[in-house]
Image (cartoon, helix red, strand yellow):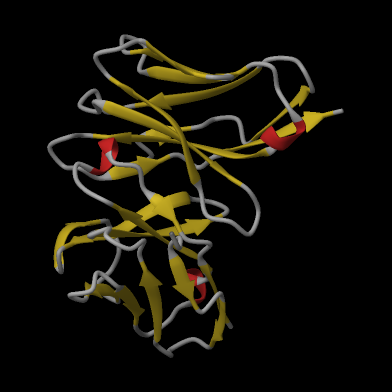
Amino acid sequence: DQQVKQNSPSLSVQEGRISILNCDYTNSMFDYFLWYKKYPAEGPTFLISISSIKDKNEDGRFTVFLNKSAKHLSLHIVPSQPGDSAVYFCAASIRRDDKIIFGKGTRLHILP
Amino acid sequence: KAGVTQTPRYLIKTRGQQVTLSCSPISGHRSVSWYQQTPGQGLQFLFEYFSETQRNKGNFPGRFSGRQFSNSRSEMNVSTLELGDSALYLCASSSGLPLAKNIQYFGAGTRLSVL
C-alpha cells in the first residue's frame, strides 16, 4: 500500500512559469515531509522539508505547502529554470519510527 | 569532503547468484540507509544502520541483508537473485538522527541487472 502518492508521473512547464508538484499521503501519523530532486545517473539530493506544525516553508525559488486536513502537500518552483528538469520525490516520516517513505516520483520537464 | 561512494556502479548477475554492494558514507556520518529504486515502485526503503546496529528494516524478503562496520562503511547482500531484483540500489548517509531532520546524502547508486 503506497502511503505517499505522487499521482502525476510527469509534468511539463514553460521556462519562467510556476511548477507545482503534488503529493498526497494516507498516514495521518506522518509528522515530517521532505522533497528530493534527482538527476539521471546521480543520487537524489535534498531540496526542502516541512514539519507538520507548519503549513508553509520557503527556500529561495522553492516553497512547500502542507494541508494536513487534506493530507496533501505541494512543491512550488518559481520561476522554473531549465536546470529544474529532474525527477522530484516527495517523502514523509513518522518521528517515532524514523523511516523515510518515498513516493514514486514526478518527472518535471522545463520547456524553453 | 568526499560524498557517498557506492561500488560497483554497475553489476550484471544471473538468477540464483548472490551479490554484495558496498557503500562508504561521508566521513563522520554514522547512519547509512539503503533504498531500492525501480521504475514501477519508486524509492523503497530497505534498511538503516546506525553505529553498526540495524535500526529499521523495510518490507523486503530475508534474501536482502546488510551490515555496517565500525568505520561506518556498509554492505548489502542479496542472495538467490531473482529477475525482479534488477534495480538501482541507493545508499544514503546522515550525520545524525532523527533521519527526517538530518539531511540524507545519497550516492550515485549501483545498477544491478539480473539476467
Q: Residue at x 28, y 41 (%)?
A: B102
Can the viewer see residue B95? yes
In the rendered image, the quadrant that contains the C terminus of chain A is top right
Tell whether A13 sits left or right of B109. right
The part of the image, by quadrant, that contains residue B28 is: bottom left
Tell whether A99 sits left or right of A105. left
The part of the image, by quadrant, that contains residue A84 is: top right
Question: At which x and y percent is residue A51?
Answer: 28, 22
- The answer to whether A88 is drawn above or below residue B21 in the figure is above
- The answer to whether B8 is drawn above or below residue B50 in the figure is below
Tell whether B79 sits left or right of B81. left
Pick the front one: B41 or A57: A57
Question: At which x and y percent is residue A57?
Answer: 41, 16
Pick the front one: B62 or A109: A109
Question: At which x and y percent is residue B22?
Answer: 39, 76
Q: Residue at x 70, y 22 (%)?
A: A80
In the rendered image, the quadrant that contains the N terminus of chain A is top left
Can the viewer see residue A1? no
- Residue extending farthest right: A112
Question: At which x and y percent is residue A38?
Answer: 57, 46
- The answer to whether B40 is drawn above or below residue B72 in the figure is above
- The answer to whether A24 is drawn above or below residue A41 in the figure is above
Tell whether A31 sits left or right of A24. left
